[in-house]
Image: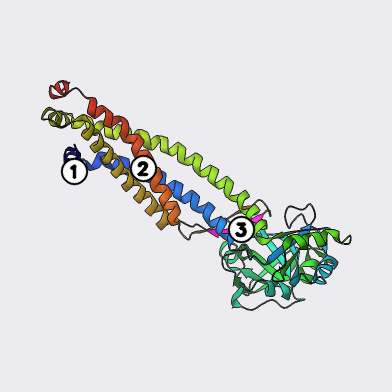
Amino acid sequence: MFKQIFSITLMNILSIPSRWSTSSVIIVGIGGVVAVLVAIFSMAVGLNKVFENSVDENRTIMVRSGANDEMSSNLHIDDANLVASRTFFETVAPELYCVANVPKKATGYPANIVVRGVTDASFDLRPELRILEGNRFTLGKNELIVGRKAQQEFDGLEIGDRVTIREVTWTVVGYFEADGSAIESELWAGLTSVQSAFRFEGGISVVRARVQHGMDIKSIRTSLDDDPRLSLAIQTEADWYERQASTGTLVIRIFGWVITIIMSIGAIFAALNTMYSAIASRKYEIATLRAIGFGGFPVVVSVMVEALLLAVLGGLLGAGIAYVAFNGFTVSTLNTSSFSQIAFDFAVTPELIGLGLVVSLVLGLIGGLFPAIRSATLPVTNALRGE
């Protein structure tokens, strides 16, 4: 039986080039499904990486109790001073989170971008932030530094450019990177300058801090809750960004599976039609093999192997197209947690390629199963007579 399986399978595979036009229908159909699946899911992976790169296990975020994001949090600089007086923290950085409209390069239409008012402590808190070109802004002046992703996506943010935000003209003096984290999609300026421009005198949105080594977040939370002067909710960066990532990537993944399922139905029908056509054109050959003693099971296996091989070729084609066309491609989308644009790179990972190949095998299995059974159950005498 194994010799029969090997012989028929080898014959089928060697004859694929002579049937390249029909075989390519399966390859292209399944390749399209895999390309779309991998491309859409690479968006979710890329967006998730942005939030993962924003995390430091020793950093915390404090917002107003009951606030779900920085935009809805309203604190005062005195809150940051009270937090800084505690011995729990090495570095305390008060920050003001605001949103402005800046034209996007791709469309020319304004879109929301984060303007973050910071002090020197914010730079101390984020050692991963590096000035790539230009220099830091001068505190007290209307100067901006621009994240690398923001500079790629938005217009008028080159060094030396002057941009009007809230009726104030700002000068771009540098741009920075931060290991691909979320702040690369932001504009940074001095805290007092942002407070003045956005009319938040003394106001801040968030207090970020680095916890002293060995301190427990639960005990810090209890201590802050016991202080009647404070109304703060403290979270680790890991918890904070995990919630933001799950909100954005869930929508992308659901959309990706819906599109994949719709396209998969078409690919399965294409595979069925192609395999049925291949069997119909080779019914004399299959009938002859069975007439000289080849069993039905080896015929089924050979047809299934052929279908799976074509499916794998389609999966590799689709994964290759997705990798070449999208891996590292920068886009921006609305971060629903902050109501601002966040830029990220598509990330075609080995795991996504593996998922694409699994999907292609499933499609090949479904598309080849019924034609394979048909080939094994075809009456030999009828096939030889051309019926």
Q: Is residue 202 left or right of residue 9?
A: right
Q: Position of residue 123 (x, y in %)?
A: 68, 74
Label number found at residue 10? 1
For the C terminus, give its image quadrant. top left
Q: Can residue 296 be seen in the rendering of this structure?
A: yes
Relative to the observer, which residue lies in front, 82 or 146?
A: 82
From this view, report whether residue 107 is shown above or below residue 377. below
Name the image quarter holding residue 30. top left
Q: Which residues are magenta?
A: 340-346
Relative to the observer, which residue lies in front, 285 or 258?
A: 285
Q: Position of residue 81 (x, y in %)?
A: 83, 70
Q: Dot 3 surroundings within 10 Å: few (below 14), some, or many (20 or more)? A: many
Q: Dot 2 surroundings within 10 Å: few (below 14), some, or many (20 or more)? A: many
Mark 2–mark 1 CB contact (< 8 Å): no
Name the image quarter holding residue 137. bottom right
Label 3: which secondary element: strand
Q: Dot 1 surroundings within 10 Å: few (below 14), some, or many (20 or more)? A: some
From this view, report whether residue 337 is shown above or below residue 142. above
Which residue is tagged 3? 342
Residue at horizontal 29 percent and vertical 39 percent from the top: 307
- Give whichever of discs 1 and 3 has the lower sequence position: 1
Characterize the magenta stretch by its predominant secondary structure: strand
- Give whichever of discs 2 and 1 has the lower sequence position: 1
Which residue is tagged 2? 361
Label 2: which secondary element: helix
Q: Amino acid at mark 1?
A: Leu
Relative to the observer, which residue lies in front, 190 or 80?
A: 80
Quote the CA–CA distance across marks 2 and 1: 19 Å
